[in-house]
Image: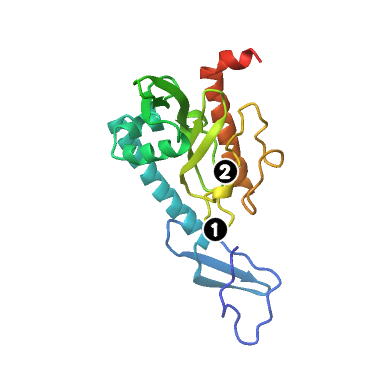
Amino acid sequence: MWRRPAGLRGKGEAVPHACRYDCAPVGKRLTRSHWFAPGGQRQHTDLCMIPTWDRGRMGTMQVSLRAALAAAMVMTLVGLPTATFAQRHRATADFARYDTSLREVLPDADTFRFVDTGTPHYRGYRTDATGNETLVGFGFFTVDFAPKVRGYKGEIWMLIGMDPGGTLTNISIVYHNEPFGYFSIDLPTFVEQFRGKSVLDRLTVGDDIDAVSRATITNNSAVRAIRDSARRMAREFLAERFSAQ
């Protein structure tokens, strides 16, 4: 909103019944304005300034443009558009960190193997005394299975553990930019309620999943990402078992 500068009226002048401001902001420079009042016309210079919101918008656009160009250059150099989250981090130092998360979501596994398919994931195995391995579950990132699911502040990355029967074993919050506090999805009570749930369950907020207070958008997005990712994993790798039910 344009504001008439203080001191515009002369001594003894009444408030004008009509006024007009002709401003043409250019960049961040001040512009000239003409004020027309009944019974006369006075010219005032430098009466109008670019509104605060306009400056902020231009600054944000410039920063966003630079960030977009930089991101495009980086992705071109390292080939990120063709790599999934799991693929990228397997070859980095961060893999050790996610290896710990894998052991959290698949506690019965002692060995993990990365499966590079159309939907990359990890398979956890348990080795018995004779050296035989048994598949105990799958570990997969929601960002690879449901990349379009976003929270209130941006993407939410979670690592899901699921056994061969389609039951969720555990969930680890890998990254998010949502608010922290007693209403955060980082609270243990949020992920704990998914343990033992089947991909055949509704997995819906307000039904079999309790909402996190004051985090409606974040809560719904996180639950949707978990549900969609787990069901997609089940369709692709457990389809035969569930089609018989």
Residue 187 position (above or below residue 143): below
Where is residue 240 drawn, in percent x and y?
A: 57, 13
Q: Position of residue 176 (x, y in %)?
A: 48, 46
Q: Is residue 154 left or right of residue 207?
A: left
Who comes first in sequence, dot 1 or dot 2?
1
Location of residue 175 in the rendering, given as x and y in whole percent from the top left corner = 45, 44
Determine whether the residue tagged by mark 2 lies in a helix, strand or loop: helix
The residue drawn where x is 36% and y is 37% is 99
- Residue type at numbered disc 2: Glu
Give the residue type that dot 1 points to.
Answer: Gly
The quadrant of the picture occupied by the N terminus is bottom right
Q: Is residue 25 something that shows in the picture? A: no
Q: Nearer the viewer, residue 80 or 238?
A: 238
Depth order, front residue of 104/52: 104
**Which residue was labeled with disc 2?**
192
Q: Is residue 2 above or below residue 66?
A: below
Instruction: Report which quarter residue 17 is drawn in.
Output: bottom right
Please indicate whether residue 205 sits to the left or right of residue 46 in the image: right
Number of residue marks:
2
* Quarter assignment of residue 3: bottom right
Badge 1 vs badge 2, beta-carbon distance below 8 Å: no
Residue linked to disc 1:
181
Q: Element type at marker 1? A: loop
